[in-house]
Amino acid sequence: MWKYLIAIGIILFDQWTKWLVVKNMEYGETIKLINDFLYLTSHRNRGAAFGILQGQMIFFYIITVIVIAAVLYYMKQYKHSRFVSVTLALILGGAVGNFIDRIFRGEVVDFVDTYIFSYDFPIFNVADASLVIGVILIFIGTIFEGKQAEGDK
């Protein structure tokens, strides 16, 4: 049950932060938090990561439903692994958070604007960060699982 609470917490935090941005900032407005590194910028995205596939909402609805179903399935399959449960909860929370935006707004609200060594990283949100962290953790877990299997041989 706790893994679903993690996902719900991510969804609630994601939607709350997006609501704050929509309510308190004009579209395109930027607030400097850390000069040359971190800004809040009110932005909207009708595509996927890095703005690809703009306006392909039906595609995103279908893919998101498939991802959510797969994550729920794997959460039941790997219920005894805390690591897998946490990573899947992060992915579930992120997928649902952006899905809510697509359904109710027709676009995703993004606002975290970072510069990394003068590279203007694409603007993202809490759901995006949760998805990315979850996927990275899955890759790390897969690598360690593979190395452990090699060591067992």
Image: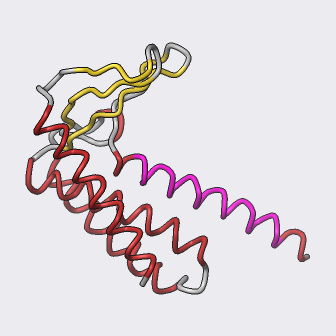
Residue drawn 38% across the image and 23% down it: 33
Q: Is residue 112 left or right of residue 141?
A: left
| Residue 147 is inside the magenta segment | yes
* Quadrant, the C terminus: bottom right
Residue drawn 19% across the image and 37% down it: 21
Q: Which contiguous range is marked in magenta?
A: 129-149
Q: Is residue 115 left or right of residue 25?
A: right
Residue drawn 48% across the image and 17% down it: 119
Locate residue 43, reporting x and y percent: 21, 30
Locate residue 151, reporting x and y percent: 90, 70
Rendering quarter of residue 30: top left
Q: Is residue 11 left or right of residue 140?
A: left
Residue drawn 25% across the image and 46% down it: 17
Display colour scheme: secondary structure
Q: Dominant secondary structure of the magenta stretch?
A: helix
* Quadrant, the N terminus: bottom left
| Residue 75 is inside the magenta segment | no
3 lies above or below 60: below
21 lies above or below 119: below
Rendering quarter of residue 45: top left
Q: Nearer the viewer, residue 75 or 36?
A: 36
Locate residue 65, reporting x and y percent: 25, 67
Rendering quarter of residue 113: top left
67 lies above or below 135: below
Count numbered badges in the picture: 0
